[in-house]
Amino acid sequence: MRSEATVYTTRELSPATWPDFAKLFSQGNGWDHCCCMHFHRPCGLPKAERLHSRAERAVRNRRQKKALVEGGRAHGILVYADGKPVGWCQYGLQEELPRIDNQRKYRRLAPESTERLWRITCFVVDKKYRMRGVGSAALQAALESIKKKGGGLVEAYPITRWESHAFGNESTHGTASMFRKEAFKTVARLGSTRFSTHVLMRKKV
């Protein structure tokens, strides 16, 4: 698949593209240890299972993520430039990405819906390609994939502001302006920290 707005190509995460995912998450960019496992877990790991070393966490998370991919329980879009993986967007059904359901503020503010609920939770962009439309290409491809899978209500948790020095000019949740360009509407403000303000945004696909 090729984004009409950019020169990037995109592919779905699958056992066939797993090596590209693993390559992108092995660059020491600060998020390599995560492997986008955070939202797959309904809550934090028990103390006995926590690992202090980032290298240890990377090995564990990569192993668990691969098992989800092989079982068809992890979805996402890989973005390529000249055949090299340079970006990533995670999406999935509510039951695949249940972490936010256990946040008290989300439960209080998120309107209930009988529609099938999808989530777009995370973005990753190679340092050399940030601020060059990679995230937008990934988001467009994710929405198209969701539509092909039957669609429904899609929600995301982007930020409306952040201190660039704190995030290296990248938000792993995307920005509200990026989602507004795809006709997402702000539903509620989820909270603020010293560096960012997160909002809940939704769109029917």
Image (cartoon, rainbow, N blue to C red):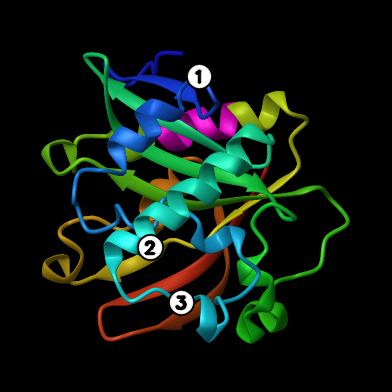
Q: Indicate left or right for 205 with 172 as reference.
A: right
How far apart are the two marked residues, 3 and 2, measured between alpha carbons? Answer: 8 Å
Three-letter residue code for mark 1:
Ala
How far apart are the two marked residues, 2 and 1, measured between alpha carbons? Answer: 24 Å
The residue tagged 3 is 50
The residue tagged 1 is 16
Q: Indicate left or right for 173 with 153 as reference.
A: left
Image position, residue 120 (x, y; %): 55, 49
The residue tagged 2 is 57
Is residue 159 a member of the stretch shown in magenta? Answer: no
Q: Tell us which disc is closer to us: 3 or 1.
A: 3
Residues rendered magenta in the picture: 138-144
Residue for point 46% across, 77% down: 50
Measured along the vertical axis of the image, is residue 140 above or below residue 4?
below
Residues packed near mark 2 inside 10 Å, few (<14), some (14 to 19) or many (20 plus): some
The quarter of the picture where the C terminus appears is top right
- At mark 1, the secondary structure is loop
Dot 2 or dot 1, earlier in sequence? 1
Residue for point 37% across, 75% down: 197
Residue contact between numbered discs 3 and 2, judged by CB atoms under 8 Å: no
How far apart are the two marked residues, 3 and 1, measured between alpha carbons? Answer: 30 Å
Q: Tell us which disc is closer to us: 2 or 1.
A: 2
